[in-house]
Image (cartoon, rainbow, N blue to C red):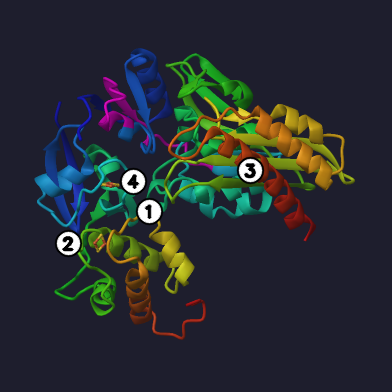
Amino acid sequence: MFPSQFEYLAPTTLEEALSLLAEHAEDAKVLAGGQSLIPLMKLRFAAPAMIIDINGVPGLSHLQEDRRGRGYLRVGALVRNAALERSELLKSRYPTMAAAAPLISDPLVRNQGTLVGSLVHADPQGDWGSVLLALEGEVVAKSTSGERRIPATSFFDGPFTTVLRSDELAVEARVPAPGPRSFGTYLKLERKVGDFATVGVAVSVSTERGVVTRAGIGLTGVGPANIKAVDAEQALVGHRLTGKAIQQAAHLAAAASEPRSDVRGSADYKREVVRVYVARGLHQAFDAKAA
Amino acid sequence: MHRSITVTVNGQSRTAEVEPRMLLVYFLREVLDLRGVHVGCDTTSCGVCAVLLDGVPVKSCTMFAVQADGRSLTTVEGLASNGQKHAVQEGFKEEHGLQCGFCTPAMMLVASALLEENANPSESEIRWAISGNLCRCTGYQNIVKAVQHAAATLNPQPASGRTT
Ligand code: FES
Ligand code: FES
């Protein structure tokens, strides 16, 4: 399969990349890992007239924590999923992300694909979107006219659609540190390694003296976009994480899902998996922390 | 429309004019005539097109040849050196790690990259590493044994981390 013809540009500075984007906004697509874009181009679902390959742009490969304030993680646009999978920083401080990274597609795709690219691609079955929603992360977008930080909660605009402007480049994702008394995980049901999620569930909970102060629950593959299960989150805040509280949150999350029947399962089945996975995720993460 | 690219392929510098839309897999197969790089699904699912890009396994059907400009690639044709089979090739031969052989070039490249990084992988680490590569014949059992065989050849110390 061959994509349609396109003009290929490989800028070597961020300024150059941004001015190319400003100039060709409507015709251009940005290439980072390419693990979603290239398959779409091969199927001719996408046929951009111009490809702006940012792989040669310096300053986009950082994976580090900024410890100011509560602290936050910075993931540059060229950080591959394989790097996230191996990161000790994620394992020690960002458990939801550490759990999700090895479940992204397959090892070969993880060697190329990026977290930021996955967010921008905005596939409702993308795992990182749910994680960012659960953790209340944000996307840093740059253009020739400046920079803006877009909260994950307003970033996704529907299937394969975000609020990113066509002249903007997503340069970084930021994720606030969950803090010391927090736990989290990511659970994914897939038919085989590399398949899209039948259902994916991201959970992240912070506590203070045993009481939940912040809860994040993100759902993958069960709606027209990644879903933040707000009612379920709010039901947990202010309560101890008892079996009853967990069951209630799991029910509310299942109610917030909007799955469709397809080859991976019926809508009812997927809704039930959401309920089971939210409960399991909260239990597992809590037990792991208590252990 | 064409662009000149220079890629080091199996240790040799190769320069060619390519259309930007040419996928790396067709560049390797049709321009450089390296037919050990296979095309299976052509949709980023099977891993049979895997090659090493600066030592890291990637799907060559999901990358443009122009992206490899200035980089170094290894295909199965580059695994042996000086007429000497790579330990992974020896392992696949000894342990009957293939039947039809269609998945084998990619499997061996992925295995060689794993052993570069982890000289003594456990069975689950081997299975994890090849989890992006489909094999329709072997049931993977002998592929795992082949990689273990190669690990033992490359690293003949007692295998402490082994879980088989
Ligand atoms: S041919 Fe490339 S993944 Fe199947
Ligand atoms: S040996 Fe036939 S596909 Fe693996």
Question: Would residue B156 appear left or right of A272 to someone viewing this image?
Answer: left
Q: Residue at x 47, y 42 (%)?
A: A79
Kindly check if marks 2 and 1 are in contact, taking CB atoms under 8 A apart as contact. no
- Which of discs 4 and 3 lies nearer the camera? The answer is 4
Q: Are labels 4 and 3 assigned to the same chain?
A: no
Of the numbered discs 1 and 4, the one sitting upstream in the chain is 4
Q: Are labels 2 and 1 assigned to the same chain?
A: yes
Of the numbered discs 4 and 2, the one sitting upstream in the chain is 4
* Front residue (pair B93, A113): B93
Task: Look at the image and give the residue range highlighted in magenta.
Answer: A40-62
Kindly check if marks 3 and 1 are in contact, taking CB atoms under 8 A apart as contact. no
- Disc 1 target residue: B132
For mark 3, give the secondary structure: strand
Q: CA distance from mark 4 to mark 3?
A: 33 Å
**Residue A228 found in image quarter:** top right
- Disc 4 target residue: B45
Figure quadrant of the C terminus of chain A:
bottom right
Q: Are labels 3 and 1 assigned to the same chain?
A: no
Residue at the far right in the pictured view: A209
